[in-house]
Amino acid sequence: MEGFLFWFCGSLMLLGSLMTVTQRSAVVSAVWLIFAFICAAGIFALLNASFLAVMQVLVYAGAIMVLFLFVIMMLQGPELEGERKLLKLPMWPAVAVPPMAIAVMIVGYLQNKGLTQWGPDAPESFGGPNHVAELLLGKYLLAFELISIVLLVALIGALAIGKDERKLPWK
Amino acid sequence: MELNLNIPSWSDLRFWLPEAILCITFLVALLGDLVVRGRRTWVPFAVSVAGLITAGAYAVAAMNHGLDAGQFQGHTIMGSLMIVDGMAGFFRLLFIFASLVTVLFAWTSEEIMGKRRENKGEFYALTVLLTAAMMVMAEARDLLMLFLSMEAVGLISYVMAGYMRTSLRSSEASLKYVLFGAVSSAIMLYGMSLLYGMTGAMEFDGIRNALISGTVDPFALLVVVVLILAGMSYKIAAVPFHYWCPDVYEGAPTPVSAIFSVGPKAAGFALMIRFFYTTFAAGTDAGTQLVQDINWPLLVAVMSVATMTYGNLVALRQTNVKRMLAYSSIAHVGYLLMGFVLLSSAGLASILFYLLVYTLMNLGAFFYVVAINNHLKSEELSDYVGIGFRAPWAGAMMVIFLASLTGVPPFAGFVGKFYLFTAVLDKQWFWLAIVAALNSVVSLYYYFKVVRAMFLSTPAEGTDMSPLKLHWLQYVVLAMLAIPTLALGLFFEEFKGLADMAIGMMGG
């Protein structure tokens, strides 16, 4: 049963992400992304990581997506001159590798169904609030701080690039 | 409900002082910029220079202390996330030096400062933070830290590439960088998640132990190696993940291209060395074994040949000096990758030494382009005709950099290549050495095309031949790079020894 649920959630998540990248309208893409996030939450739940599943729905499918939608709403994207050229670049290695890898994994699974568990067993409290807190504020404290720096850079970068619009060449 | 918070010891952080200083410098430079906004543009610049020098002093002291103590096998920081060992110490110095000269040179660059020298505080602050992030890349020994540091470097780079907001080219460069960066991060992250799924470990030695015990599927492991290698090759711009490189270097402000061409690349190499040599290769120098018989060295060797050949051949056709330097930097990545496949500490040490040399000469060449761009507003080769006589000293230094990039004796580039080739021949990769030697000959042509334009071609009638007045700081920085490029070609023993020691003191 668990196996079936995993493939159910997993394939729906793939569908969701595929629709996200193929839709022409940004808003529709965003809605499909919410769908993919909820499927990811389902996979977390299957792993007994109920806390992560709830957080996935609250933070990603909820808060972050609202932000995304706001940004899409406010950005009436300017047409850049180089935009068409960008798609023509020979991006084949970047495009071809992930689907190939996924195909390889699925074929591998079908050939050897015993391969469902590669790693050691998860600890008892895996994915619960305690476990997450222990890792976040203990072992990975420094990594956590590094994320805050990354976010700060993103903020400052957005300001540095976005400020004073009058001088921009496409205005 | 009891939390078992296993907070690692804070006292480890004393080994992490240079990074901490740089992070604080970043904040102070930003705040200082806000406080004096619009008035004293030198404040963020001065803060950044001071911070970089202080961090550099601490890094040198830490290196000396480690060397004196005789064993610098590394101090882990806050658990097993990072390690400061000989190799990390070497890269720290390299990054701080590269950023320091870049910040100094950027101060004189019109592309960065704008015509009226309006306030550009964020540039200096971001360069400082980029240094810290690159240092973390060289220290990471945990998949999480590896990914986060790469993302930090990436994000800072995207902002810096798009720094000339009034230039469409710069915005385009930034956008391309973001898109390629996102795709390659995703690919690498996928590989990393598979690796974690197979081994149940995030820290490198845990992964290695799980791999040695041999319960993983070799084919899936090969997929993992390819995916992770793809993400890392993007960072160092190796073929076939180099597409972003020429466009970004050409579009970004030249001082930014300069630091991109050495900093993140060197950091990428540090990361690749630490990751592949701790997880996928077990044992030490004499008998380094491949884990699970995954033959990644052959894979990288093929990449190396493709990279150097592609870089050199395409560089031949370039008419824009900046773009040519971008392709030349791709070619150099090809040479560097040769040292990576050897599974010997001689190979790794020659990578480190070559990176040091490459930093000096490549920064120098890019900075000359900055200095000329201030006056000509162009990087086209056709505009470089006769420029050597208009600023003879700077021109002479540019010739040194280009000759060194080619690998002509007695310059540093020759010594660097010599060590690389010796290491390659030692391990009997003859075909690799032959291709690389042929490539060096090809590179002679396009580097000397620039020299010919600068000094030998006759300018057309009516070309402005008045002397160019370069900022004194530009002469100082160029000399700071040209003199070591010369000196390292003659007195290289000391620094090669440092590179050997750095690799010898690489903690697991």
Image: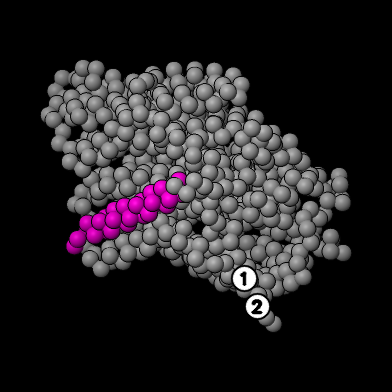
Residue A24 percent across, percent down from the top left: 58, 54
| Residue nearest the observer in this picture, B42 or B117 | B42
* Quarter location, residue B6: bottom right
Tell me how far mark 1 sits from mark 2, CA to CA: 9 Å
Q: Which residues are magenta?
A: B39-67
Subunit of mark 1?
Answer: B
Could you say whether the residue bearing mark 1 is in a helix, strand or loop? loop
Query: In the rendering, which numbered label is found on residue B6?
Result: 1
User: What residue is at 40 percent from the left and 34 percent from the top?
Assistant: B494
Instruction: Give the number of the disc on residue B3.
Output: 2
Query: Badge 2 sits on which subunit?
Result: B
Q: Quadrant of residue B79?
A: bottom right
- The residue depicted at 54 percent of the width and 26 percent of the height is B423
Q: In the image, B478: left or right of B260?
A: left
Label 1 crowd (10 A; few <14 / some 14-19 / many >=20): few
Q: Is residue B202 magenta?
A: no
Quadrant occupied by the C terminus of chain A: bottom left
Residue closest to the eye, B450 or A21: B450
Which label number is shown at residue A141?
none
Q: Residue at x 42, y 59 (%)?
A: B17
Amino acid type of the residue tagged 2 in the rendering: Leu
- Residue at 43% over, 54% down: B132
Confirm or deny contact between disc 1 and disc 2 (CB under 8 A). no
